[in-house]
Image: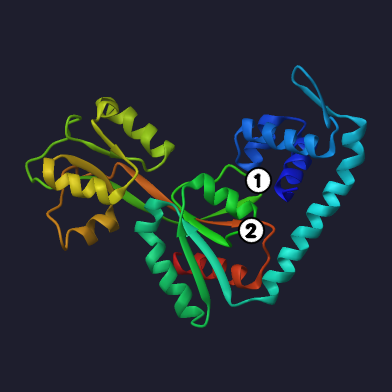
């Protein structure tokens, strides 16, 4: 029995709603249903009574709940104990765009502060980062978006102004040559409101490197954070084509609220101070 299935059962029993449980666990409702079905098949009982929008525990579910809570808490305490036993390891991650903006410098700061630390660094999408934080497979993460979970703290490190740039000095915004980078739903929504024709852009990507590479080939325009663009100007032709900043791009440090590992707590405080 995968302990995550029992955690899902506990969450559904608390929320009495598959959709809310899915949101809290950063899963799809279908995945939550599949996990509950696995638990029911394992114990050969029905755990919930489903009637329209109301979900109630069956007598079997009521009996299982305290055991599931106890087991989940035991596993959680075991993870904490093992983590405290081995202070020399840290696992962290970043979303693809956050990796380009901050990950390298953040990793350098971590290694400088703890030079004997064994560090694992991965690049994941936001959904996988949320899942791995919940499962304590990673200790902290960097992202340009927050996670919709009451169990994860999103610490705002900084905001960078964003401008429209082009490789051609004479360029103006044109939806036919505009390259849309997915900076997150909020920024995309505001950009499409300001530039409705951008919705018809023929080039959309979440890969910053691909967008920059294509920019040099088609003399189009692109929305970039200022610090990244200035660094890029040292090696590529890049011109700011609109004087006013369009938006600001946030960068967050994500940590599990229940993770009180001294190393993680120290690093959160370090990064908060570093970007003030």
Q: Is residue 201 above or below residue 245?
A: above
Foreground label between 1 and 2: 2
Image x and y of residue 232, in percent: 21, 58
Residue at the extreme top of the image, as rendered: 52
Q: Earlier in the sequence, mark 1 or mark 2?
A: 2
- Quote the CA–CA distance across marks 1 and 2: 15 Å
The residue tagged 1 is 150
Q: Residues within 10 Å of mark 2 (few under 14, many from 20)?
A: some
- Please tell me whether mark 2 sits on a helix, a strand or a loop: loop
Give residue 30's position: percent from left, percent from top. Answer: 63, 30
Q: Is residue 12 left or right of residue 128?
A: right
Q: Secondary structure at mark 1?
A: loop
Left or right? Give the position of 275 relative to 208: right
Q: Position of residue 234 (x, y in %)?
A: 16, 63
Q: Quadrant of residue 26?
A: top right
Q: Nearer the viewer, residue 41 or 175?
A: 41
Which residue is drawn at the image coordinates 23% and 31% (left, top)? 202
Residue 191: name its quadrant: top left
- Front-lying residue, 174 or 1: 1
Look at 32% across and 50% down and name the residue there: 161
> Given the current orientation, which residue lies at the most extreme left position?
170
Q: Residue at x 92, y 40 (%)?
A: 63
Give the residue number, with chain letter if any, for mark 2. Answer: 136
Residue 166 in sight in this render: no
- Towards the viewer: 196 or 3: 3
């Amino acid at each position: 029995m995968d302990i995550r299935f029992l955690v899902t059962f506990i969450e559904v029993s608390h929320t009495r709603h598959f959709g809310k449980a899915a949101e809290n666990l950063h899963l799809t409702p279908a995945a939550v249903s599949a996990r509950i079905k696995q638990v029911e098949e394992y114990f050969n009982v029905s755990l919930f009574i489903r009637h329209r929008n109301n979900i109630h525990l069956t007598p079997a579910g009521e009996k299982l709940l305290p055991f599931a809570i106890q087991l989940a808490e035991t596993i959680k305490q075991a993870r904490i104990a093992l983590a405290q036993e081995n202070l020399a390891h840290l696992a962290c991650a970043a979303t693809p765009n956050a990796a380009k903006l901050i990950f390298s410098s953040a990793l350098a700061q971590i290694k400088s502060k703890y030079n004997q630390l064994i560090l694992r660094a991965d690049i994941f999408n936001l959904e996988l980062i949320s899942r791995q934080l919940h499962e304590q497979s990673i200790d902290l993460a960097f992202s340009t978006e927050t996670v919709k979970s009451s169990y994860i703290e999103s610490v705002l490190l900084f905001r960078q102004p964003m401008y429209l740039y082009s490789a051609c000095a004479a360029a103006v915004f044109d939806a036919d040559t505009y390259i849309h980078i997915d900076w997150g739903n909020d920024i995309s929504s505001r950009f499409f409101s300001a530039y409705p024709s951008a919705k018809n852009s023929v080039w959309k990507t979440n890969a910053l490197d691909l967008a920059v590479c294509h920019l040099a080939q088609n003399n189009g325009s692109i929305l970039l954070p200022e610090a990244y663009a200035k660094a890029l100007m040292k090696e590529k032709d890049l011109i700011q084509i609109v004087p006013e900043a369009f938006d600001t791009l946030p960068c967050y440090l994500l940590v599990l609220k229940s993770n009180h590992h001294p190393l993680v707590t120290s690093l959160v405080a370090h990064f908060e101070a570093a970007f003030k």
